Amino acid sequence: MTKSCPERKLIGEILVERGFITTENLQNALDRQRRYPGEYVGEVLISLGYVTEIDIVTALVLQCNLPYIAISNHIVDEGVIRIIPADMAYGERIIPLDRIGNVLSVVTEKPVNDALREKVEGTTGCKIATFISTRSEIDMALARFYPYAHKEGV
């Protein structure tokens, strides 16, 4: 498995260092994560009520050096939206923002790993530049930019 942010501190470490959670909160989340594999520790921390989505995004920005963008404040050209098919946008939870030459700026709720980067670049024919946002902002953007796919339950 390729890491999205190699050689970086773990999200939990960052959240503890920044005072968002205690070491006990982190241990509770890690224990729960072991019982329910497949969930990211950030998702567990949110579901336990220890942090908010923006706290997790803040930690991801620090961990991966990815810029945050509020999608709701961004105007996206319809032609750019068509670059990523609706099934990929929903399946990978990725939104195209802008295209300059052969570089497509995208926003997602978690860092893009090598496999996803290759998939998106192969589908779009563009190199990608990644931004990060919250899960709820991604949900709103998917509904906003891919409304027909949303209604059809893609």
Image (cartoon, helix red, strand yellow):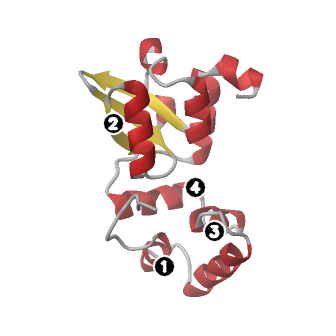
The three-letter code of the residue at mark 4 reads Glu
Horizontally, residue 117 falls left or right of residue 48, namely: left
Measured along the vertical axis of the image, is residue 120 above or below residue 132?
A: above
* 4 or 1: tag closer to the N-terminus: 1
- Residue at image position (47%, 69%) is 11
Q: CA distance from mark 2 to mark 3?
A: 29 Å
User: Which residue is disc 3 drawn over?
Assistant: 45
Q: Tell me the amino acid under the disc marked 2.
A: Ile
Q: Nearer the viewer, mark 4 or mark 2?
A: 2
Pointer 1: what residue? Answer: 16
Q: From this viewpoint, is residue 112 visible?
A: no
Of the numbered discs 3 and 1, the one sitting upstream in the chain is 1
Q: CA distance from mark 4 to mark 1?
A: 16 Å
Residue type beneath disc 1: Val
SS label for mark 1: helix
Alpha-carbon neighbours of circle 4 within 10 Å: few (<14), some, or many (≥20)? some
Work out whether 82 lies above or below 110: above
Q: Nearer the viewer, residue 114 or 130?
A: 114
Q: Quadrant of the C terminus?
A: top right
Query: Closer to the N terminus: mark 2 or mark 1?
Result: 1
* 4 or 2: tag closer to the N-terminus: 4
